[in-house]
Structures are given as structure tokens and as C-alpha cells.
């Protein structure tokens, strides 16, 4: 019996989350061969290559995903984060701006208002799925809400939390890093990124995020509390 594309995607994601990157690459190559016009196939292939340090081919795969689907948010996030990491800041900014513009479609004010109403409903449903630990459905609904209302930054934070709970920590990290880079003054992204670092044992990175919050807002109580908690805890090896 041939597995459905959705099940195949979940299998590849599971391999990536288990750090079985070479196996994920093999599985994603098969998906690309079977579905050459699938943006998801090229995106997953790119992610599997990224974790093996194959940066040029990673960039090529992610660009192909965006060529097939300019609205592929995950591919846009991954590619822009990667380009930012290697110092191609203008390219990184351009990639994500292009993705956002393709979603917006120059909508009229009335269309935007309607989309935001639908986004609220998708967000409510996503939160319900999240509450009952149905993270796949939650991620799907958060993504719909984010597409309909790209101005709501909180939606992306909630989606990052769902990624993390599902075990897709790297995707959660990418989401939050992109959000922080796009909106440097948006404190909740820095707070959540610090918590994610801390949960992975990266205390120094967590503290750097919370310190950056205090530079923006010296009396931010949440950041100060987290920072004190981290500094008082024994350093993890």
C-alpha cells in the first residue's frame, strides 16, 4: 500500500526530529521524484540537507519550493534565516517580504477585514486543538490564521509553541528567530525564544535573549525573572 503524501511528510518530519538526517534526505529525495511539483517535497529535502551542512543544495531546494509555491511560509522562513546566518541580509529580507506580498495580493480594505475575521476563527480552533494536544491540526490552523492575517505576530508565536510541543524544535526556533529578526522591538518573540533555548539546555543563548529584552525595556519583569532564574540555576554541561 502506497502511503499518502501527508503520512509520508510526517515520516520525513519524524526522521528530522530524531536527527536521522541522512535517512530523511533519502526519503525526501523519493518524495521529490514522486511529486516533482510539490513545494513541500523540495522544502523537506532542503531541511534534511541543511542539517548535514549542505548549504548550497539547501538553498537551491528551498528556492525551488518557493518557486512552486510563493506562499510556502516554512520555506520562506527557513531560507531567510539561512541567508541571514551566512550574512546575506538583503537577500534574507527580500525573500520574506516577497512571501508576505504574495499572501497579501494587494487586497482591498474590506477583503483584509474579512480575512482577519476568518483568521480569528482559525486561531480559536487552533487553540482548541493545542489544548487537547492535537498539534498537527493546531499547526495547520495556526498556519491558516497566519496566512489570513500576517500582521498578527502572536499567531506565529503560538505556532512556534505547537511546533515545539510536536517535537519540531528546529522549526520552532526558526519561526521565532525570523519573527525576532523581522520585528526587533517585538519583545514576546525574544521572551519565547529565550524559553525555547532554555528548554534545550542552552542557558547562555537564553540569557542573551532576555538581556536583549531588558535593553529594550529595562523594567520588563518577565525577562528579569527568567534571567534571575537562569543565573541562579546550575550551569548545564
Image: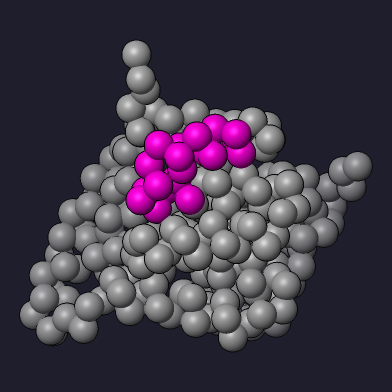
Q: Is residue 165 left or right of residue 121?
A: right
Q: Nearer the viewer, residue 106 or 188?
A: 106
Percent x, y of residue 155: 37, 60
Q: How many marks?
A: 0
Q: Is residue 12 left or right of residue 20?
A: left
* Range shown magenta: 24-42
Residue that appears at 82% across and 59% down: 204
**As rendered, which of 220 and 92 lies closer to the eye?**
92
Between residues 56 and 152, which one lies in front from this camera angle? 56
Instruction: Tell me which residue sits at (61%, 39%) in the image.
Output: 25
The N terminus - image quarter: top left
Is 92 above or below relative to 192? below
Residue 93, magenta (yes or no)? no
Q: Residue at x 40, y 36 (%)?
A: 34
Residue 123 spot, x, y in % from top left: 27, 53
Residue 60 in the image: x percent, y percent?
57, 62
Q: Is residue 214 left or right of 4 when viewed as pictured?
A: right
Q: Tell me if residue 164 can be seen.
A: no
Residue 31, magenta (yes or no): yes
Q: Residue at x 28, y 71 (%)?
A: 103
Q: Main secondary structure of the magenta part?
A: helix
Camera-side residue of 218 and 59: 59
Residue 65: image x %, image y %?
Answer: 44, 58
Identify the image quadrant of the C terminus. top right
Amino acid at each position: 500500500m502506497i502511503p499518502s503524501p501527508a503520512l509520508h511528510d510526517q515520516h520525513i518530519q519524524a526522521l528530522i526530529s530524531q536527527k536521522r538526517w541522512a535517512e530523511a534526505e533519502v526519503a525526501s529525495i523519493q518524495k521529490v521524484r514522486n511529486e516533482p511539483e510539490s513545494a513541500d517535497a523540495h522544502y523537506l529535502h532542503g531541511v534534511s540537507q541543511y542539517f548535514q551542512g549542505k548549504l548550497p543544495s539547501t538553498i537551491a531546494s528551498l528556492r525551488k519550493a518557493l518557486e512552486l509555491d510563493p506562499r510556502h511560509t516554512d520555506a520562506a522562513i527557513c531560507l531567510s534565516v539561512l541567508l541571514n546566518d551566512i550574512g546575506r541580509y538583503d537577500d534574507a529580507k527580500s525573500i520574506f517580504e516577497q512571501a508576505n506580498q504574495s499572501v497579501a495580493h494587494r487586497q482591498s480594505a474590506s477583503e483584509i477585514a474579512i480575512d482577519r475575521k476568518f483568521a480569528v476563527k482559525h486561531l480559536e480552533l487552533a487553540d482548541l486543538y493545542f489544548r487537547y494536544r492535537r498539534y498537527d491540526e493546531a499547526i495547520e490552523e495556526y498556519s491558516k490564521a497566519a496566512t489570513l492575517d500576517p500582521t498578527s505576530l502572536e499567531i506565529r508565536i503560538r505556532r512556534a509553541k505547537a511546533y515545539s510541543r510536536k517535537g519540531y524544535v528546529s522549526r520552532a526556533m526558526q519561526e521565532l528567530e525570523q519573527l525576532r529578526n523581522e520585528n526587533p522591538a517585538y519583545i514576546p518573540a525574544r521572551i519565547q525564544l529565550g524559553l525555547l533555548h532554555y528548554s534545550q539546555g542552552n542557558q547562555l543563548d537564553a540569557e542573551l535573549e532576555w538581556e536583549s529584552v531588558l535593553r529594550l525595556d529595562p523594567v520588563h519583569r518577565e525577562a528579569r525573572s527568567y534571567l534571575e532564574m537562569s543565573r541562579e540555576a546550575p550551569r548545564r554541561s
